[in-house]
Image: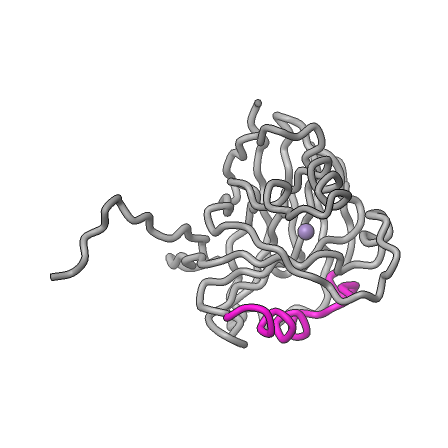
Amino acid sequence: MADQHAIPAAGRPTVAVADTALVFPVRRIFCVGRNYREHSREMGASDLEAPPFFFTKPAEAVVASGGVVPFPGRTQDLHHEIELVVALAGPGKIYGYAAGIDLTRRDVQLALKQSGKPWDTAKGFEHSAPISAIARAADIGHPARGRIWLEVNGQIRQDGDIADMIWGVPAILAELSTWFEIHPGDLVFTGTPAGVGPLRPGDRVCGGVDGVGRLEVTMAAR
Ligand code: MN
């Protein structure tokens, strides 16, 4: 007889696959820190050539485009970071790409950095990973360049090009796989260009990577 769950087992969160009726089940979310030079400078990094590093968010952090993001507590400085996202079908197997936002409690992150503590409360909270539909690599190929941008209430905040990533997707995946086992359903947020900044309750946030995907979410009232 199969083991019975002691409490209900949650299904996996999913992300829509563009131009299909499919959904992509999310397993883990890996994120790259400091992968664009101008953003590294604005964050005060001293060694711009240091290898990117990784942190994670729970799969439940995904929010579909069109959704409302509950405004998190315990921050006075919630930041947007628009990023190219890689969706994996297995080790070394890219299923597709999306545009996502790495929501960050910046005030908390700065305090944690200063005290040498882990980043989970700054990065790994619920609803912290809004994401567009996933465009299949079989349909769009493997984008090496393209505008990456984010607007808040119609005002442009971030405007870069994924060609300016310090580490490209193949190098990120090669490095990531030396730290973690990669499985189908893993997402990788690949870092953000310059222009990160604060969000307020009620803000309309729109962003994308041209040729890949576009998303739009609304920040809820507190
Ligand atoms: Mn980020």
Residue 121: x %, y % from top left: 60, 41
Residue 94: x %, y % from top left: 53, 71
Q: In the current view of this chain or complex, which residue is farthest to the top?
A: 222
In magenta, the rendered stretch is 162-181
Q: Quadrant of the N terminus?
A: bottom left
Q: Tell whether 38 sits left or right of 58.
A: right
Residues 96 and 8: in front is: 8
The residue depicted at 62 percent of the width and 56 percent of the height is 55
Residue 176: x %, y % from top left: 61, 69
Residues 69 and 65: in front is: 69
**Does residue 139 belong to the magenta stretch?**
no
**Does residue 166 belong to the magenta stretch?**
yes
In the image, residue 193 above or below residue 67: below
Q: Tell whether 202 sits left or right of 70.
A: right
The residue depicted at 53 percent of the width and 60 percent of the height is 187
Q: Tell whether 101 sits left or right of 197.
A: left
The colour mode here is one colour
Residue 186: x %, y % from top left: 50, 62
Q: Tell whether 105 sits left or right of 67.
A: right
Residue 167 position by quadrant: bottom right
Task: Count the marks.
Answer: 0
The residue depicted at 51 percent of the width and 73 percent of the height is 138
**Main secondary-structure element of the magenta-colored stretch:** helix
In the image, residue 198 above or below residue 175: above
Q: Quadrant of the C terminus?
A: top right
The residue depicted at 74 percent of the width and 46 percent of the height is 113
